Image: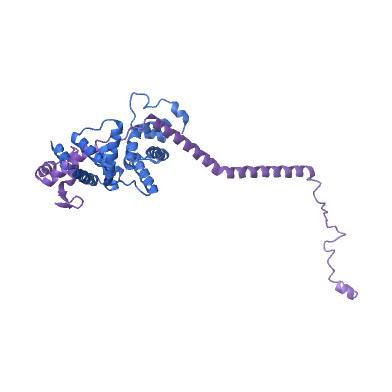
Chain colours: A blue, B purple
Amino acid sequence: MAASAQTLTLPFQAGEKRADDRELVQLSQSGMEAAFEELVRRHQQRVFALVAGILHRSDDVEDIAQQVFLKAYLGIKRFDQRAAFSTWLYKIAVNECWDYLRKRKVRPLTYEADLSEEQVSRLDGIVSSSRPPEGPSARAETREILERMLGVLPEQDRQLLVLKEIEGFSVQELAEILHLNVNTVKVRLFRARGRIMETYRRRLNPLGKGHAASQEGKE
Amino acid sequence: MAMDSENGRTACRKHEALLEDYLNEELSGAEAPSAIEHWQNCPVCSALLEDARLSRRLLRVAEPSPDPGPSFARLVMTRIRTVEHERVALRANFWQPFVSFGWRFLATATVALIVLVSYNARWGHDAQPNVVTVRPTEAMPMDILAPEPTTVAANGDEVLF
């Protein structure tokens, strides 16, 4: 890539008009490193979220995310822009995650039995009050509890639910990224929701709070 | 009605895909009014919807992954540059033996050419072999070595010769 290109004033640096991804991709294809860097900045959070959603927030998320952008850079000249850059990038990310999981052979197994009574009651309190936990440590712990609950779902259903509800991907995006039909995504999401609530109730019942959350929800 | 084998519950398959849209408040189209009417009257579907709403509240408690920050893009670009350098070096290493062989061959050929040209310039004329040109004369006919067919052999030795 031409290093001198970076010294030029790029359309997206001028501040007058924010260049869209299409222009940035074209500039990247012509060898402008700064244009690709801008693409990285724009999409890094979503790629991070996607990788974290699939890999259960493992320690390797940052490394995999870097690898995704590296592959995108090496393959950008072959990208014909028939799909959106983001979709193409997310597909690379998903493939990279699956490769990673395949190499590791096993997914980190989690069991609902791992949840302690204290954790379940904390979760119940959160659902009843509909208030997010305060403080980073409490939030991290809640996320951990949720991940354990989600462990009862088949891997793809868990990914769908996490990416949709926690990371904020749309149904359309998920269908494109995961090569699924839109209606299939919707049905699987809905069934996964039912299953996660079943698990939740099963954990609540020993505490005698079976309907607490459900009653709160109706109110 | 279709049996949901996982939950042991039944759900109306006809409207199943629309439930997710309804939950996301994205339901539209001609099917919407009939679907909504069904869900309001069907206890199984309304219970499923209620569960779905609760699950959403449960899941949204968790925060999305944080932005990795501006340093991430710099790290990515540094890694890209490193890989680019490695690729260039690798490409150079691949051709290196061929280039090296080419230079050696060229050098050897040049030396050989110089040696030959110098030799030719210095000793070229002397080294030529003496060539005696024999021109036929009247005194020495061309068939001097051939026996005359009409000559009769004088003795036995001559016959053998």
Please give the count of numbered marks on the rendered protein: 0
Q: In the rendered image, is residue B28 in sight?
A: no
Task: Indicate left or right for B77 with A215 as reference.
Answer: right
Q: Which quadrant of the rendered structure holds the C terminus of chain A? A: top left
- Return the x and y of residue A178 as percentages of the image width and height: 30, 45
Vertical placement of A162 versus B10: above or below? Answer: above
In this orientation, which residue lies closer to the viewer: A218 or B79?
Answer: A218
x and y percentages locating residue B160 in the rendered image: 86, 73
Percent position of residue B34, x then y:
11, 43
Residue A38: image quadrant is top left
Question: In the figure, is residue A202 to the left or right of A2?
Answer: left
Please give left or right for residue A114 compared with residue A205 in the image: right
Q: Nearer the viewer, residue B37 or A165?
A: A165
Q: Nearer the viewer, residue A141 or A106?
A: A141
Residue A36 appears in the figure? yes
Q: Is residue B66 above or below residue B111?
A: above
Residue at left 14%, top 45%? B45
Which quarter of the picture shows residue B142? Answer: bottom right
Q: Position of residue A148 (x, y in %)?
A: 28, 43
Q: Residue furthest bottom?
A: B156
| A140, above or below B145, in the image | above
